[in-house]
Image (cartoon, helix red, strand yellow):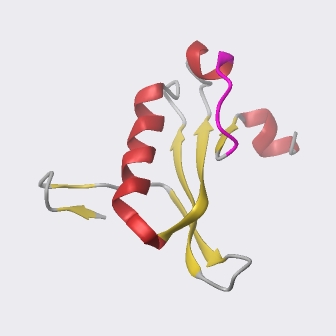
Amino acid sequence: MADPGGRTAHEVDVVAVGTDGDGRRGVLALGEAKAGEVFTHGHLDRLRRVRARLGDRALPGCRLLCFGGAGFAPGLLGEDLPTEVVLVDLERLYRGT
């Protein structure tokens, strides 16, 4: 996704597009996958910025999916995260917990 104001492009690993309960089509979820590094607040904040740049193309309640193969920063695990933030570790990915 191009960000002309920031003169950069944003890449995400997962984009889920679909239709909400009102029949409106848009982005349901954005996700970032980190296999060899710990998922941090910085990664989550970047996802939030990308979602904000989408404007009304991101449907209300657009989820932020955080895939952390090497785990999550202690601050993320200890926080009471909003329901739109979903932490997915290897256990959850492979066993569905």
Describe residue 48's horizontal placement relative to residue 24 as left or right: left
Total marks shown come to 0
- 82 magenta-colored: yes
Quadrant assignment, res 10:
bottom left
Which x, y percent locates residue 56? 44, 70
Is 81 in front, or is 34?
81
Quadrant assignment, res 85:
top right
52 in relation to 87, above or below = below
75 in relation to 83, above or below = above
The magenta span reads 78-83
Q: Residue at x 80, y 39 (%)?
A: 92
Quadrant of the drawing holding the C terminus? top right
Quadrant assignment, res 88:
top right
Is 24 in front, or is 90?
24
Describe residue 79's horizontal placement relative to residue 91 as left or right: left
Main SS category, magenta section: loop
Which x, y percent locates residue 51? 43, 55
Is 53 in front, or is 33?
53
Describe residue 26's horizontal placement relative to residue 80 as left or right: left
Describe residue 84's horizontal placement relative to residue 26 as left or right: right
Quadrant of the drawing holding the N terminus? bottom left
- 80 magenta-colored: yes
Q: Residue at x 61, y 41 (%)?
A: 67
30 in relation to 46, above or below = below
Which x, y percent locates residue 11? 36, 56
